[in-house]
Image (cartoon, grey):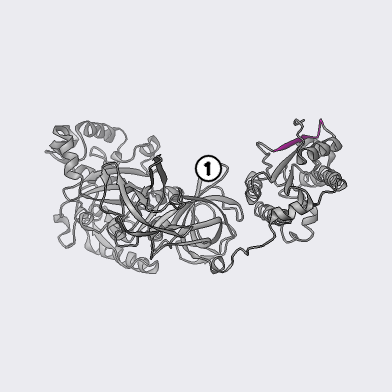
């Protein structure tokens, strides 16, 4: 054993079964419960060191790892000639160079009583998004406080977030007690300060411990240095606290369907992880959002059929009746189903460097469901330090706010306080596929329950048939001055002359009435297009051919309008004119004003234009005249295709 290891523990032996009989080792741990927990708090409170100590004291480090730890401690450690336990967790080069945690590090260890997965979360505010990731699946949070510094801003922020995420098992670990001489007065003062703050954010109870992650006081064994402390050690508390899975078993049955298992014509099952409750063959179930009911005929696993299954198990459920059920649906207790709605109030934690854009459509992923969602301007944001509600128009990185959101179809959900699986979601940017926010649903809005689609006897197809045409939307997009309005006007004239029923929605004209309250910020541009898209959809319901001439600079919003319409009815017409040519024309003098700084948020100058990637029709106005382009578009609409010029 090396010198450093000898100083720490002259007799360090891992479980012999790991090397001698791995099968026996795994079998000995098969029936142990699993606790997932996180360590969090402010910078340099000792989170990584604590986890390193837990790994070390639970004999989960092998000889080669110990040798590497000794070498790394001498080279980049922060503890002089002693072992730097944080290096067992901080694996990134940038983390070791700076002595900080950047990403979430997951580590596994076990004791005789329980298995553990611990997530070491970064303390820096800029990495709050990573802390949310670690907390999302945790049963317990260990919030560390440096005994020398007391309760800090990040202590409050992480406490608020862990409570918001739904973690109800909180441990306040007053760390580095060795650096304050194990003074009880210092410890008691910190506990009093934290108790006052915890009550203000709704934390009703927590467990406080005086520890030293570096020295090992009260981690796995009670310390003689804190004879005044009568509570459990950290590991004793972790071994006995109730895990979420135990509570989930007592809830009504919930199975979000992940996969329809159909290996042959004689078998059809629905696979997924049971989120809550218990199930057995013969139990009545309801499939949501359709509401169809049936009974469970079999519970299938790779190891054979089960007589019952509980929360936390992955199974395939077969139901007696051939009813429609697919990925994203939820199989639930027939007499206690979750809700389904499309409008909600929610808390949102913004995780992206780019601010929330109210009105923009994002992908919303909840359990196995993925829908398109738009978020309205926040009702308010929460100042984590003062808990004050602050009026804001958007949410920036790490901001926490309460918002209303709307989905394009009904979402099966439960309030987050009742069910983290069916109440928690993430938002994903449709263009970059980056996760931009984590959310917690409060409740569905009353208007979502009271407003229903009215069944109409005269269908949109009947309206179109009466006019002898196919309803569609010709969406002309391009830079200002590209020729959108000119070509759209020519197309309408030709269609009108042929007896077709049309209506032209022009960008400038709409802003005189329907959208006169909107400016040209990114959020206002998005709302402008949303409203026009809804109007265009209503007009196609009347059987009309609708032409729209809008810059509509963002792909996400053009795609949003496409999804409002039946497949094939949205025709994107890209008027592809180079910026220099559009600026040379400058019929309205707008480019000149934008260049002079008199017109802000002007597309092509200080606001971006996202050109279509695969439009149905592309018009190059440097090679094709407006008249020829209009003729080609009319032929396309009437079913006569000509190659793109």
Of the pair 398 and 156, the residue shown nearer to us: 398
For residue 75, which quarter of the picture? top left
For residue 524, which quarter of the picture? bottom right
Q: Is residue 178 above or below residue 67?
A: below
Q: Residue furthest right?
A: 497
Would residue 364 be counted in the magenta stretch? no
Q: Is residue 581 above or below residue 524?
A: above
Q: Is residue 447 left or right of residue 594?
A: left
On the question of residue 314 being in view, the answer is: yes
Q: Quickly name the residue at label 1.
A: 433
Would residue 617 be counted in the magenta stretch? yes
Of the pair 543 and 98, the residue shown nearer to us: 543
Q: Where is the N terminus found, in terms of image quarters?
A: top left
Q: Is residue 181 left or right of residue 596?
A: left
Residue 628 appears at what percent x and percent y? 84, 35
Stretch of the chain drawn in magenta: 616-623
On the question of residue 57 being in view, the answer is: no
Q: Is residue 457 left or right of residue 144?
A: right
**Which SS class for mark 1?**
loop
Residue 59 appears at what percent x and percent y? 18, 41
Residue 273 appears at what percent x and percent y? 35, 49
Residue positioned 81% across, 41% down in the render: 483
Residue positioned 67% across, 54% down in the render: 530
User: What is the count of numbered marks?
Assistant: 1
Of the pair 462 and 424, the residue shown nearer to us: 462
For residue 106, which quarter of the picture? top left
Q: Is residue 2 above or below residue 406?
A: above
Q: Where is the C terminus found, in terms of image quarters?
A: top right
Of the pair 85 and 372, the residue shown nearer to us: 372
Residue 562 appears at what percent x and percent y? 65, 47
Q: Is residue 17 above or below residue 40?
A: above
Q: Callout 1: 10 Å neighbours few (<14), some, many (20+)?
A: few
């Amino acid at each position: 054993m090396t010198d450093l290891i000898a100083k720490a523990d002259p007799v360090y032996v891992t479980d012999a079964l790991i090397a001698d009989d791995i099968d026996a080792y795994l079998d000995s741990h098969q029936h142990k419960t699993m606790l997932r927990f996180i360590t969090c708090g402010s910078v340099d409170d000792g989170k990584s060191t604590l986890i390193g100590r837990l790994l070390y004291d639970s004999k989960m480090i092998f000889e080669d790892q110990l040798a590497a730890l000794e070498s790394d401690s001498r080279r980049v450690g922060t503890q002089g000639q002693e072992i730097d336990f944080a290096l067992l967790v901080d694996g990134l080069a940038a983390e070791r160079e700076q002595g900080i945690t950047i990403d979430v590090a997951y580590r596994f260890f076990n004791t005789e009583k329980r298995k553990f997965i611990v997530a070491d979360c970064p303390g820096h505010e800029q990495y709050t998004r990573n802390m949310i990731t670690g907390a999302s699946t945790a049963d317990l949070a260990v919030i560390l406080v440096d005994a020398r510094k007391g309760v800090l801003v990040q202590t409050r922020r992480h406490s608020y977030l862990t409570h918001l995420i739904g973690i109800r098992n909180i441990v306040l670990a007053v760390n580095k007690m060795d650096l304050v001489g194990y003074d009880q007065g210092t410890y008691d003062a910190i506990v009093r300060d934290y108790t006052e703050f915890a009550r203000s954010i709704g934390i009703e109870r927590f467990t406080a411990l005086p520890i030293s992650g570096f020295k090992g006081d009260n981690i796995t064994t009670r310390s003689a240095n804190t004879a005044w402390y009568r509570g459990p050690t950290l590991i004793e508390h972790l071994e006995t606290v109730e895990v979420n899975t135990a509570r989930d078993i007592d809830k009504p049955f919930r199975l979000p369907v992940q996969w329809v298992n159909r290996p042959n014509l004689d078998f059809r099952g629905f696979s997924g992880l049971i989120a809550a409750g218990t199930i057995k063959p013969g139990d009545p179930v309801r499939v949501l959002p359709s509401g169809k009911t049936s009974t469970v005929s079999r519970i299938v696993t790779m190891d054979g059929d089960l007589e019952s299954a509980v929360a936390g198990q992955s199974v395939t459920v077969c139901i007696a009746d051939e009813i429609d059920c697919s990925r994203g649906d939820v199989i639930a207790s027939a007499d206690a189903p979750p809700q389904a709605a499309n409008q909600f109030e929610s808390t949102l934690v913004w995780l992206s460097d780019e601010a929330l854009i109210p009105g923009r459509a994002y992908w919303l992923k909840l359990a196995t469901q993925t829908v398109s969602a738009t978020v309205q301007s926040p009702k308010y944001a929460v100042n984590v330090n003062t808990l004050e509600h602050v009026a804001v128009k958007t949410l920036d990185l790490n901001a926490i706010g309460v918002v209303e959101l709307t989905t394009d179809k009904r979402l099966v959900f439960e309030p987050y306080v009742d069910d983290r699986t069916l109440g928690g979601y993430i938002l994903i940017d449709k263009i970059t596929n980056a996760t931009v926010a984590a959310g917690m649903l409060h409740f569905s809005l009353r208007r979502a329950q009271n407003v229903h689609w009215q069944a109409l006897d005269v269908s949109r197809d009947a309206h179109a048939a009466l006019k002898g045409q196919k309803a569609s939307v010709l969406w002309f997009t391009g830079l200002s001055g590209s020729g959108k309005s000119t070509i759209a006007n020519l197309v309408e004239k030709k269609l009108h002359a042929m007896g077709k029923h049309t209506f032209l929605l022009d960008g400038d004209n709409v802003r005189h009435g329907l959208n006169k309250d909107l400016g040209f910020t990114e959020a206002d541009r998005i709302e402008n297009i949303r409203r026009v898209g809804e109007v265009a959809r209503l007009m196609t319901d009347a059987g009309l051919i609708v032409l729209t001439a809008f810059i509509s600079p963002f792909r996400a919003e053009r795609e949003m309008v496409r999804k409002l319409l039946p497949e094939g009815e949205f025709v994107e017409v890209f008027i592809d004119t180079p910026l220099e040519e559009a600026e040379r024309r400058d019929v309205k003098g707008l480019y000149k004003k934008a260049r002079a700084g008199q017109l802000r948020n002007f597309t092509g100058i200080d606001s971006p234009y996202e050109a279509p990637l695969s439009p149905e029709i592309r018009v190059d106005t440097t090679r094709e005249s407006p008249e020829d382009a209009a003729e080609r578009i009319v032929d396309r609409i009437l079913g006569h295709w000509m190659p793109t010029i």
